[in-house]
Amino acid sequence: RQWGKMTPQHMLEHVSSIIYISRKDLGLQSFVPEDKLEKAQSFILREDKMFRQGTKAPMMGDQLQDLKFENLDAAKKVFLESIEKFYAFHKDAQHAEPPQIMHPAFGPLTLPLWERFHHKHIIHHFAQFGLMETDMSAKAKTDA
């Protein structure tokens, strides 16, 4: 890792858990006041803004979560399955109004916003382990 405390397995389990909440109505509440949701959601859509190194999700705390899976290979499998299940849920959820699933830091998101969020989130964590490159320069950095 290039920053942070997570191991590769922690990172995959973390990303998988966020993908899980993007396809379930878990009754989560947003940490962001309603009058700031539009600004928070606009961050998701901006191509020139990425998560800052060391950005901490408000619901995560400072301690690493306990590992859920036996090993890294099991976590990889769950990560890939979580992406498949995310798209299957949203494909099957074709309603008159697209479902809005609550993200604790960005409020209710529809499929296009969840896709953009996952894109940024995965790039952020893959860059954490040198798997991808991203511009984390001062002009591109921002908090969510």
Image (cartoon, rainbow, N blue to C red):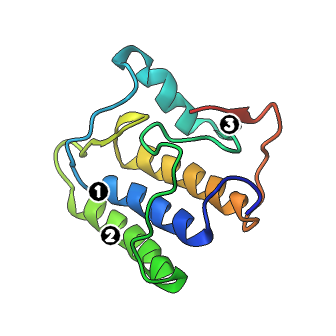
- Determine whether label 1 and label 2 are within 8 Å by CB: yes
- Could you tell whether 133 is left or right of 77 in the image? right
Tell which circle, 3 or 1, labels the residue nearer the N-terminal end.
1
**Residue shown at the point (47%, 77%) measured from the top left:** 75
Q: Mark 3: few, some, or many residues within 10 Å (few <14, many ≥20)?
A: many
Does residue 57 sit above or below 1 in this rendering? above
Q: Name the residue under label 1.
A: 23
Q: Name the residue under label 3.
A: 49
Mark 1 falls on what kind of element?
Answer: loop
Q: Mark 2 points at which residue?
A: 85
Figure quadrant of residue 142? top right
Q: Nearer the viewer, residue 24 or 7?
A: 7
- Could you tell whether 110 is left or right of 129 in the image? left
Q: What is the three-letter code of the residue carrying label 2?
A: Lys
- Could you tell whether 141 is left or right of 26 in the image? right
Please provide percent x and percent y for residue 65.
45, 58
Q: Distance between the residues labelled 1 and 2?
A: 8 Å
Q: Distance between the residues labelled 3 and 1?
A: 25 Å
Specify the quadrant that holds the N terminus. Answer: bottom right
Q: What is the three-letter code of the residue carrying label 3?
A: Lys
